Structure formats: C-alpha cells, structure tokens
Image (cartoon, grey):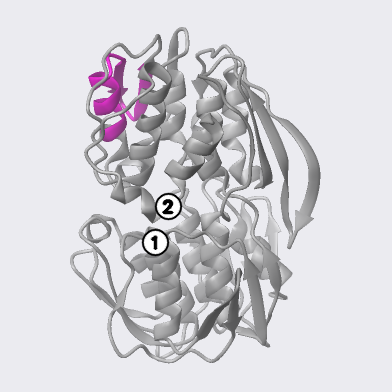
Amino acid sequence: MIVNSIISLSGDKSISHRSIMLASIASGVSRITNLNDGEDLQSTIKAMQSCGVLIEKEGDTIVVTGSNLENPTEPIDCGNSGTTSRLLTGLLSSQHLSFSLIGDESLSKRPMNRVITPLTEMGCTITSNDGLLPLHIDASMGLDAIDYEMPIASAQVKSAVLLASLGSQNMCTIKELKHSRDHTEIMLESMGADIEVNGDNIDIKPLSSALQSFTMDIPADPSSAAFFIALTVLLKGSSLTVQNILLNPTRTGFIDVLGKMGVQGLVSNPTINNGESCGDIQFIGSKIQSCDIPAHMIPSIIDEIPILAVIAAFAEGKTVFHEVEELRFKESDRLHAIIKNLQLSGINAYEEGNNLVVQGGKPTKMAKILSFDDHRIAMAFIILSIVAFEQYDIDNTDCIDISLPGFFNILKEIQG
C-alpha cells in the first residue's frame, strides 16, 4: 500500500471556535469559509445562537451578524467540547451575562476549576459541581482587572481570561507558564483589540469600541492532517501534500517532532491569513527514528501525542514524551488510552513518572482498538492498524465526528 495524493482539509478547529465566538460580539457582519465541520463547532454555533446571535449559512460561507449578547434562557449544552465550555466562560462573562453551561458525560468529568479560579477573582459569582459541570456564572456586576499568573500551560484557560478581560474595568495581565497556542491573541489583535504580547506576558485592555468584523478562509487543521501525514510517512514510497494548512509556530510542534524522528516536511506557497501563517506542506515515506521530546514542546503537540506515539511504535529504539500529565484531562485519559492500545498491539509502552515511554519496533498483534469514545485515540490507532495490518477493528467510530466527520472518506481517497 502507498499514498500518493494532494488533499484539502476542513478548517482548523481552534480557529473555527474563536472565529464564531469573536464574530458574535463584533460590529457588523463576518463571513467565514472552510469552518471546521465537526460536532464541537456545532456546539459553539448553537451556544452563540442561544445568546441571540444571527448565524446563517450561505452556500459554503457561514455569515455571523455581531450583536449585543443576551442572557440565554436555557443552560448552554457544550456537548463534548472543552474549547466551547472554557472559552464561553470568558466570552459571556465579558458581556456581563448570567448563564449556565452543561455538557455530555465526558465533558462533565473535565476540570473547570482552572477557569473558575481566575473568573472568580475577576468578580464572577460561580457555582459548580465540585469544580465540574454543570456550571452557573453570574457576571452581571461587572469584572475587575486581573494580574494572573498561569499555573498550567493551557490555551483554553489563557483564552478564557483574555476574553473575560475584554469586559473588565482596567487593563489585565496574563503571565504564561509555557507558551501555548496563540490564536486568541492573533485574532483579537487583527480585530482591533488593544493587546500586547511581550515574551510570556500578555497585556490586554478592555474594549473601548466593538471588535471589527472580518472575512476569513480558515486554513486546514494541522491536528487533523497529522493522521494522514502519519499514514504517509510510515509507508515507504508514499507522498502526501496538504494544501493551505495552518503553520502557526505554536501548532507546528508535530512537524518539529517529525523532524527529530528523521521526517522532513517541504513547505511551499507560504501566506499570511488574518495574521495566521499557512501554506502547503509535503511529506514522504521515511525511516522513523526514536527521539526524546522535552517538556517545553508538549503544549504545542498536546493534541498530536496520540498519533506521534503511534509513529514512535514503528521507530527503532525508545521514544520518551516528557511531562504529559495534561493528557489525563482530555476527552479521555489519553495517557492511559495510548498505553493500553499500544500494549494490546504488542508494543512495550508505559508511564514513567509523568513521562510516556514508547519502545519502538513494529506492532505484532491486531487487537480490537479501544477508542475510549475519544476521536483522537480512535483515529490514531486506526492508522496504526492500517499500516501494520492493512485493516482495523474498533469498538466505536461515531466519536470521530466530533472533529473530523470526513476521516474515512479522506482515508479512502488517499489510499486510492
């Protein structure tokens, strides 16, 4: 089996969420094309509609008419989307609303204290289920400024505080522990917010006028592309080009790790789109080397660690991912899910402190994949099974629709 294809993918999920949210409070009409088509984005769209925002589809374009947000009459269902739930806490608080957030069984197990703590410090009255959803936030009394030192590296938490700061009384400062993806900062600046980034410090002033509306064609999601890139680099003689992919430096950690594994990506047609770097990138089948992945790289590859662990399973030698405890707080306990599926496939993988260790070689057993109802676990181990055995058996594929409903169609296309 070989891959020889050029593909275009749906838009980056992180940028898609933020584009819908920020367009909703902007002045005028924003037009968005190539929006991510996963279920998580539908949660965000429905959430903003419940606050009175007009969001319509015109052909392939999503049209958002910005407005003053209203208190939702019912709890907002965030589904399975951690980005929706955490970013909404900040965005809706900035508009001084009173609202409740709920989610599915998986989301209701994910920690919310990480956003509850700074928002409470800013003046929100918040009740929760012992730090979990359901969550009720009352920001109707306004927000105080905050000087917040991030206890963890999390783009979602950082973004929640940044968005809340738009409605604070004075300038807010956020100090990052480790630099995380910066789509919120880029989009806010491009829409006219007064925001300044100096190293790990971010200063943001409350809005003195509404954000500017925008037109954006969202670049392809590198986290989605990673699965098809992995299939390509693991198959000798293969070649894959992904068109118009996001190349933001906080999101190219996957490409950087592939470089450490002996795989090089060739970038062409570089452009800047609403402040975001993007372009085409080509990969070819390669001999995989084991490597050591330091802690400072983990925030930029947190979503790609499942598929990187799969690639590491085919390497010669031991690959170590350092300080990956944040994997425990995703759609599933991904650290456990990765290790379990690798072990079922005959790969020696284990946890050592907060590190993930993968002893490479080649999978020897075609086991039934345990998805843990997690889209990234499901897709990663489907790739492993296809490369090793040219077939797969999995307990659940429905969860893939959360981020990439077209996954199987693309797989079929590139294997054709």
Q: Residue at x 50, y 75 (%)?
A: 164
Magenta region includes residue 128: no
**Residue 292 on image: x %, y %:** 50, 19
Is tag 1's residue or tag 2's residue first in the polypeptide sequence?
Answer: 1
Between 35 and 341, the one lying in front of the other is 35
Label 1 packing within 10 angstroms: few (<14), some (14-19), many (20+): some
Write the residue at 23% across / 34% down. Answer: 370
**Tag 2: amino acid:** Pro
Hey, which residue is sitting farthest front in the picture? 416
Tell me the SS state at disc 1: helix
Circle on res. 405: 2
Residue that badge 1 annotates: 39
Cα distance between the residues tagged 1 and 2? 8 Å
Q: Is residue 190 left or right of residue 136?
A: right
Where does the C terminus fall, quadrant-wise? top right
Disc 1 residue type (three-letter): Glu
Would residue 195 be visible to someone looking at this image? no
**What is the quadrant of residue 402 in the picture?**
bottom left
Q: Up-down: is 167 above or below 397?
A: below
Q: Nearer the viewer, residue 34 or 15?
A: 34
Please tell me whether mark 1 or mark 2 is closer to you in this view.
Answer: 2
- Figure check: 314 above or below 25: above
| Contact, mark 1 vs mark 2 (Cβ under 8 Å) | yes
Which region of the structure is painted magenta? 337-358
In the visual, does 265 lie left or right of 84? right
Residue 62 drawn at (x, y percent): 58, 74
Please state the horizontal and vertical placement of residue 291, each as a whole percent of the image.
Answer: 52, 16
Front position in the image: 198 or 401: 401
